[in-house]
Image (tube, grey):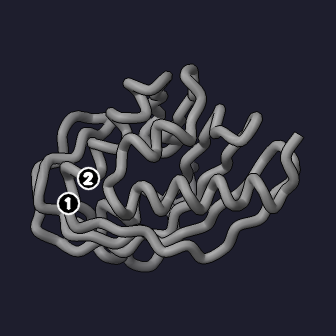
Amino acid sequence: MLTAQDNAAVARKHLDAFNSRDIEKGLALVTNDVKWMNIPFNVNFTGHAGYREFHNNWTTAMPDCKVEIVNVVGSEEWTVVEFIGRGTHTGPLAGPQGTIPATQKKLDLKVCELLRIKDGRIAEAHVYFDAATMLRQFGLLPQTLGPAQPTPSAR
C-alpha cells in the first residue's frame, strides 16, 4: 500500500496532466475501470473512455482552463484535492439539462476532488463544485437572489 504522500503525488500528477492537456499521462494515472463522478451534475463516467469524456468536456468548453492546487490531504487510500479552476467559457459544456452554449465569460471556481487511489492509480473520483456559482459566473443565474421575504402565514 502506498503512503499518503505517495497518493498526494498521484493527485498532483493528475492535475498537472490536466493543465498540460496530456490525456495519455492522465490515463496512465487511472485504473482501467475508474469511476469518475461529477456530483453536482449527477453524471458518472466509467473507464478510460469515461475519463477521456469528462476531461474533454471541460477542455472543449474552456480550452484555456487551468487548475491551481490549494490543498492536498489524504490517507493511504483516499486523497482530497482542493483547487481553483479558471478559464474562459468559449465552447459548449455538456450539463445535466443539456449543453450550455459558450458564454464568453470567465470562470473562477473552487473545486474539491475526493480520490480513491489504489496501487498508485486513481480508481474512483468524486468531483464537487457549486454549480450555481458556475452558472452565475456564466451569466446564466442572477448574481444575488436578494433578501429573503417573509412568507404570509396560512390561516
Image vertical order of residue 46 relative to residue 37, above or below? above
Please state, as top left, top right, bottom left or bottom right, where the N terminus lies in the image: top right
Q: Is the Cβ of the residue at disc 1 closer than 8 Å to that at disc 2? A: yes
Name the kind of residue labelled 1 in the image: Pro
The residue singled out by tag 1 in the image is 63
* Residue 149 shows in this picture: no
Residue placed most toward the observer, 30 or 60: 30
Label 2: few (<14), some or many (≥20) within 10 Å?
many
Q: Nearer the viewer, residue 123 or 23?
A: 23
Query: Can residue 49 be seen at all in this image of the molecule?
Result: yes
Question: Which residue is denoted by mark 2 in the rendering?
Answer: 59
Quick check: 8 above or below 46?
below
Q: Please give the name of the residue rendered at 57% of the width and 20% of the height, measured from the top-left corner.
A: 33
Q: Position of residue 126 (x, y in %)?
A: 60, 42
Secondary structure beneath disc 2?
A: helix
Residue found at x 81% / y 58%: 74
Q: Position of residue 115 (x, y in %)?
A: 67, 46
**What separation in Å lies between label 1 and label 2 (alpha carbons)?**
5 Å
For residue 29, above or below residue 16 = above
Instruction: Name the quadrant containing residue 69.
Output: bottom right
Of 49 and 88, nearer the camera is: 49
Crowding near the residue tagged with mark 1, few <14, some 14–19, many ≥20 C-alpha atoms within 10 Å: some
Residue 97 quadrant: top left
Q: Residue at x 48, y 28 (%)?
A: 44
Could you say which is closer to the camera, residue 116 or residue 84? Answer: 116
Question: In x, y percent, where is residue 123?
Answer: 65, 32
Q: How many marks?
A: 2
Residue, x 46% and y 37% (percent of image)? 27
Q: Is residue 153 left or right of residue 3?
A: left
Residue 40 image position (x, y, % from top left):
48, 45
Tell me which amino acid carries mark 2: Thr
